[in-house]
Amino acid sequence: MSKIKKDKKNSKIVKEVKTSKGKEKEVLKEKKSKQYEGTFISNPRGFGFVEVEGLEEDFFVPEEFVGSAFHQDVVRIQTIKGREGKRTEAMVMEVLSHQITTVVGTYQKSGNFGFIVPDDKKITRDIFIPQGKDLHALHNQKVVCYLTGYGDKRHKPEGVVVEILGFPSEPGVDVTSIVKTFGIPTEFPTDVLVEAESVNHPVSKKDIKGRLDLRKEVMVTIDGEDSKDLDDAVSLYKEGENYILGVHIADVTNYVTERSKLDEEARRRGTSVYLVDRVIPMLPTELSNGICSLNEDEDRLSMSCIMTVDPKGKVIDYKISESVIHSTRRMTYRLVNRILEDNDADLIEEYKDLVPMFREMEELAGILNKRRHKRGSIDFDLPETVILLDEKGRPAEIRPYERGTSNRMIEEFMLLANETVARFAFEHELPFLYRIHGTPDGERIETLNRFMGNFGHRLKGDPNEMEPKEIQKLMEDISGTPEEEMLSRLVLRSMQQAKYDTECEGHFGLALKYYTHFTSPIRRYPDLQIHRILKEHLHGDLKKKKLSYYEGTLSVVATETSRLERRADEVEREVEKLKKVQFISSYIDQEFLGVISGITKWGIYVELPNTVEGMIPIVSLDDDYYDFDEEHYCLIGERTGNTFTLGEPLRIVVKKADFETRTIDFDLAGKKKAKPVSKKKELKKKGREALKKKSKSGKKNGRRTKTNRK
């Protein structure tokens, strides 16, 4: 047992520890310890971390120093001097504010009152619901509760049920629970819908006045088959040897005016969220799927970036203008890929007026890609997933998403437009929102380099001044190797997060000095904001008062939208994980052939061809005692020398699909734990030698199996 208190006599924080000899005191910190304010991130095991803005490393808060801090609270902490390990330790001194006001969970009826077991396992205590405050929720229904108290060491948090989502087995309730847990708004306020309806009118002569009229120019939208918010159209023709590329983006700002109800709601949401069974739009569908969507054969207001590109892929001239367009055809990636990749005769005949433009687009995209590669742009081509649901919302099919020629083509055109607009803003010294991606942290690169050395790969140059070209070379070096996917993810994690900023600090991953987000104002608030700035500049409206206004607001918008973007990404990941668990739960005890995608001291990660990944816990490998060899990144059997290595095919059995943790457990196929499908004699030999060395030194570098621990 231990107790924390302040020794007033010598102004020290001490920890009283009861021992067999009585009470002993351990000094934890002195007055000179530093104080910070940050966000408390709880851990299901009781301890937590505090993230402080501007600091690369967060602080570790041991369980006994958490106090009454609740997940996501803004807290004041004090570092504990002399308690510094991998992370500096700290204790919570004061809770400054609560950020979480609602909790989603499962309602548990208990007599006249009840409890809510939170879905978010970082909220470590159940929420007490007093009598009459449950909204007549039924036992085991998913509900949303509003917190009326956050509890302390002796009392549970308390709340009232404000919404009943339904039983987990009902269609859509599982996804809605995740969405609500992350606090993503799903319904638009009435005044926002009324305003959307009032501005949703056909393009008029008044709207067109003063705009560049491109309605007779051939252009197309190319999107996914299910897309309804078509915010970009492209056009292309040649003048001599040069390409005239037009990227035309929906002029959302014509309908969403600054500080209107629509604008305030869009800023509150920050981004649209794309989930497997729904889209949660940033703007009401009256706009996002209606007047702001560049629908086929309809007049639409747009912002056009028209670039003259030479045969080497360099933009030698450009024009940014308000415009009016008339999309010729609504194309899909699948259709264009069948034309360009498969030479589908029927489609070529059907779209014969457009095929020459598609061929030139393919040609230009290849030139742009080659130029981008030459400057050192990094491609993290990690597998994406397509999840198809049945009428009950359960996954019927899961497969990898294949990017074809047209996908890469549109990507190259959007990148070029974003770069061109960012350069324009920088050269004209506009107040702006840039998309930046900083140079990787030197320590992270050194750690990555040490790890890569185990596989015979290495980054050259100063870790503190790493060049994109070196990362690109590394990615090419690991391409096609068994460890490619795992190492690619590790390289990606070594990079800084891309974010929005008012300073033009460049984009490391794209190897660009200038970059922004201009091409998706329907679904990203920063794009909407910079469209507004561009238009004001074009109209000469960026006066001193307006410049002062942007100086005070853009940095806040950059921080807000970066945070909201991360939230959307996390929700999308969690929903995908849940659907994969649901899918594989129908295949318990069935066999599949997969590939080892990761190895740790606690188990083997195996990825199936459909991108579903699960883990074989090391404790289930009971045919031998297995050690984790960090040098060769494999598991080695002490007695048999059997090895498990990255990229190795492995036949597995699905053993467990955990809906709460959204994790999957596999086991080796066969009653007697079949040996790995493939062996590498050289590695086995190295493995035995490594184990002998460990045995002599008396050290173990891995976790033993269940049998071994006995």
Image (cartoon, rainbow, N blue to C red):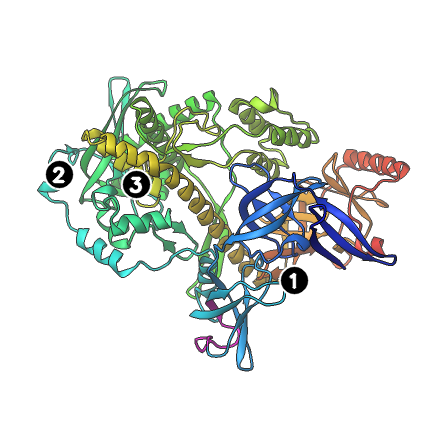
Which one is earlier in the sequence, the residue at label 2 or at label 3?
A: 2
The residue labelled by disc 1 is 589
Pick the residue in front: 184 or 541.
541
- Crowdedness near tag 1: few (<14), some (14–19) or many (≥20) residues, C-alpha within 10 Å: some
Locate residue 645 relative to residue 159 in the image: left or right. right
- Identity, as a three-letter code, of the amino acid under mark 2: Ile
Q: Is residue 323 above or below residue 465?
A: below
- What is the crowding at mark 3: few (fewer than 14 residues within 10 Å), some, or many (at least 20)? many
Q: Nearer the viewer, mark 1 or mark 3?
A: 3
Relative to 668, 500 lies left or right:
left
Dot label at residue 528? 3
Q: Is residue 701 magenta?
A: no
Give the image location of residue 462, x and y in percent: 60, 20
Residue 561, disc:
none
Rendered location of residue 274, percent (x, y): 40, 51
Amino acid at the residue labelled 3: Leu
Of the image marks 1 and 3, the number of the one nearer the N terminus? 3
Foreground label between 2 and 3: 3
- Pick out the residue farthest to the right: 696
Q: Describe the element under mark 1 as helix, strand or loop.
A: loop
Residue 39 at what x, y percent from top left?
A: 53, 48
Spatial CA span between label 2 and label 1: 64 Å
In this view of the protein, can residue 703 be seen by the observer?
yes
Q: Residue at 58% across / 67% down in the picture?
A: 156
**What residue is drawn where x is 44% and y is 60%?**
180
Residue span colored magenta = 133-145
